[in-house]
Image (cartoon, rainbow, N blue to C red):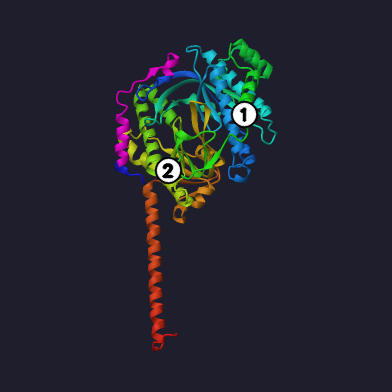
Amino acid sequence: MSWDYEESLERVQRAYDATKGLTVGEVQRKTDLENTTLTHPKRIIGAHFYVDVPSYRTQLAYDPIDDESTGGGEDLLHQSHLWAREASRVVETDFDATKVHFQGPKLHGLAYRPIGDDEAMVVKAVLTVAAIVATGRIFNEVLELDQSAAWRTAAGVDFGEALVTANGVRGDRELLFLGNPANRAAKIIDSKGIRITLEAAALLPEAFDNYIAETSDPDIRAIALDDDRLEELVEEYRHGWSREATRKRLKDALAAYPPGSATVYQATVKIDKAKLGMSNTKRVNAVSLFADVDGFTRYVEDADQAGLLAEAVRAYHAIRSEMRHATVQDYEALRVQYQGDRVQALAYLPFDDEDKAALRAVKAAAALHSAVAEVLPQVIGADAAKPLAIGLAGGNVLVSKLGEHGNRDVVSLGTSTADAARIQGCLNGGQTGLDKVVYGRLPKWLQELFSWDSTARAYVSSDLTLDEIERAESVDASARAKSASSVSVASTVAYASASAAEPIRPYCSDC
């Protein structure tokens, strides 16, 4: 399996044609979000929020995935499932907000109701993240986690208009959000506490004034609510969360799913996402890949101002479709999830050859660059075919599903997942970055196309397409063939010379 120019061109054209007649509407009621389709994206005004677990890397070190003698991450997996279950309930049950998805332990949510009441949306988002941060402290108490293993949370909130659409192939679709609010809410998260943008802070009522503080960034504010004040505000704004309710739910969940409930199996066949869960999580040595469309959010905004939003969304769907096909169909990677204009995938085949899996992952990245350079401009135009920034990192990961039953998200948990995302975030469009693990598994001729970048802390190559890889491989093969031929000729000459110098001896059966 490999990427092919002609096949890619046909796929992109089909994906683009499938959105003919696309119209952009408005979210005006709850069912509008649920009924979003490929050809009917919608503008949505709301408060996007993310709650992250900055200490998760410490937890991974505390319960290492690689060490099967200590369970190979089963304790952390167990905690992750309990955490995701409770965080989902806080969002959707207690505050009637929307859980978009989990990106590993990081939760993306949205408050877009009551529609038309901007202040109420931001209040809901801020109280929701404050409640989840407080839930983190209760979580540590109920699970009796000491300081070295304690979960520490942080959150970000932004407000504004975004575009919601549904993307992917049949049976593999998700709601996706394009626009600054969905991006900035994640990017402003600090190592601890709650951060909100000025746009969000300006909409908060006076009841929050004493709890808002400036930060080192003039465009960001911090919010700190003590637990008692938080519960007062939750009651004042008629939401349903309380510390006691969360504590009870966590205790009930822990009783229903005690330590040891999470089970990890080593992957030996292709991973079936439909069968993943707490009792069926797969451990696999893989290359994590994150590919982000550089500058596409700005492109969509400019297209909107020019009255060309529908065309920009059609381009987005074509890009997304080819990103999936190039990774999943051409190189047998596992598509973990879409995150706005970014895709996350795992390259883990073949199981018995990590070097070959790494080479396949890098070729998948090069195929994505090839599609952007050679195929997409012909269908969606050069302006829309924005370059990709791609980060790759290797190591053992746990592949599972997190969230409430019936609304769970496929996730990849491991330090290499975080490393790949970090590397991608440090790169410019057109660049591919590798951690030391992936770099070390590549053949020397391919390593020579990368150089160490101290800023990204990765080996980086620019404009790496499949054509460039094939040329480098061909040059290496020719050099090896020439070297082998030289050795063969030299050996033949040496043998002939030695034979000529030796006297002819009679046949002897005992010699």
Residue 67 seen in this snapshot: no
- Residue that protrudes farthest toward the front in the picture: 256
Which residue is at 54% across, 13% downward?
A: 120
Q: For the residue marked with disc 1, what is the amino acid?
A: Thr
In this picture, which residue range is highlighted in magenta? Answer: 7-33
Q: Position of residue 418 (x, y in %)?
A: 55, 38
Name the residue that disc number 1 marks.
153
Instruction: Please tell me how crowded label 2 is: few (under 14), some (14-19), or many (20+) other residues with Cα within 10 Å.
Output: many
Residue 297 vs 73, above or below: the answer is above
Classify residue 283 as left or right of residue 7: right
Which residue is at 30% across, 39% downward?
A: 9
Q: For the residue marked with disc 2, what is the amino acid?
A: Ala
Labels 2 and 1 touching (C-beta < 8 A): no
The label on residue 365 is: 2
Classify residue 190 as left or right of residue 307: right
Determine which quarter of the picture holds residue 151.
top right
Q: Position of residue 313 (x, y in %)?
A: 37, 27
Query: How many discs appear?
Result: 2
Disc 2 versus disc 1: distance between alpha carbons?
Answer: 32 Å
Element under label 2?
A: helix
Q: Is residue 27 magenta?
A: yes
Q: Position of residue 373 (x, y in %)?
A: 36, 41
